[in-house]
Amino acid sequence: MDYQKILNEIVIEVNALENSGEVANYIPELAKVNADKFGIHLTTMNNEHYATGDSEEKFSIQSISKVFSLAMAFSLLGEKLWKRVGVEPSGNPFNSIVQLEYENGIPRNPFVNAGALVVVDVLLSELKDPERDLFTFVQSLTGSSNITYNKVVAQSEKETGYLNAAFVNMMKAKGNIVNDTDEILDFYYKQCSIEMNCRELAAAFLHFGENGLSYEHAGFSLTKSQVKRLNALMLSCGFYDESGQFAFKVGLAGKSGVGGGIAAVYPEEFAVAVWSPKLNKKGNSVRGFHSLELLTTKTESSIF
Ligand code: DON
C-alpha cells in the first residue's frame, strides 16, 4: 500500500474544500491557535512512517487524553470500573449534564467529560503520585520523553470550566466521587492540556492496535480482552453524539479532542493521527474527520 501517495492525495482534496467550522473558543487559550494548521501521520505495525503537513507541531490533545487515563484506571480496577462509569453511547454532547442527574451520577461512558472525571477520581484514589504516573505512562506509549502539558491552557480551562465543576459536584452529591473536587479538576485540566504532535499520538495509539499482544507500559498492563474493550468504547463513544457517523463513514476505533486532533487505529495494520483545529458542531475536527474518511475509503481499510 502506497500510504504516502494516499496522504498526499488527501491533503490536496482537503485543501480544495473550504476550511469550515470553528476553533474551540469556549477555552479562550485554545481559540488562539492558527486555524489553518493541518497535519497527519500514519504509522504501520511494521514501524513504517508516513506524514504530511504540520505533523511535527505539538497541539493540545484535549479529550484524546481520556483514552490514556482510562487505560490506566482499567488496568488498576479491572471490571470493577464499570460500576462507576457506563459503556453506552450517550447520544449527547460531551459536556451535557442532563443525563447525569437522572442516571444517578453514573456517567454514560468514560469519554464524556463526567466519565473522564470519574476516571480521574479512580487514579487519585489508587495511585500515590498519579501525575507522575500519567506522564510516565504516556511517555512510555509514545516512546518520547518530551511530553508535557501546557500550563496556560490548563489555567484557561480552570478559569472557564463551570460545567466540569458542575459534573464533579453533581457526582459527589450522588456518591460517585471520593476525592476533593478541586484536586480532580486540576488533574483533569493537566491531562487535557497535554501537548503532542501527530507522530507521537500515532505511536501511542499503535499499541491499541496490537491485537493478540498483551500490553504493558510503565507498570500498567492491559490484557488482550481489555484492549479490545478500549477499542470498542472508542468506536461506540469516541466521538460523542457523532460516534455513529464516524463508525459509518470512517469505520475505525478512534478518539477526538477539541484541540482539533483525532487519533484512530486499524488493528494489526496502522495507527493514524490527524490535526486540524476547526471543529464541527459536535466538537470534532472537520478536516480531521474528512481526512480519515478519505483514508479508509482509498485504502479500503475498515474493521468491518
Ligand atoms: O473539558 C473539556 O471540555 C475539554 N478539556 C475537553 C473536551 C474535549 O476535548 C471534547 N472532545 N471533543
Image: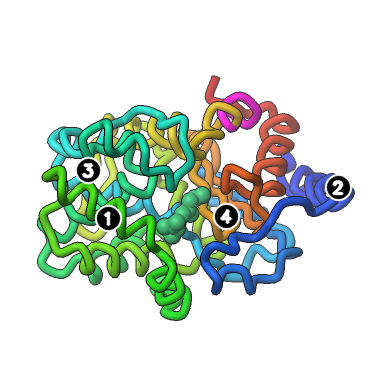
Residue 119, above or below 229: below
Q: Which residue is mark 2?
A: 17
Label at residue 261: 4
Q: Which residue is mark 1?
A: 217
Q: Quadrant of the N terminus?
A: top right
Ligand 1 within 8 Å, label 3 CB: no
Q: CA distance from mark 2 to mark 3?
A: 40 Å
State the extent of the magenta-drawn residues as a range.
246-251
Q: Which residue is mark 3?
A: 74
Choose between 224 and 98: the one closer to the eye. 98
Label 2 Cα crowd, 10 Å radius (few <14 / some 14-19 / many 20+)? few
Choose between 155 and 54: the one closer to the eye. 155
Give the residue at x 51% y 34%. 241
Amino acid type, callout 1: His
Q: Please indicate whether residue 250 sits to the left or right of residue 122 in the image.
A: right
Counting residues from the start of the chain, the first of labels 1 and 2 encountered is 2
Q: Is residue 303 visible?
A: yes
Residue 95 rendering spot, x and y as whole percentages = 43, 48
Give the residue at x 35% y 57%. 164
187 is within the stretch colored magenta: no
Choose between 163 and 20: the one closer to the eye. 163
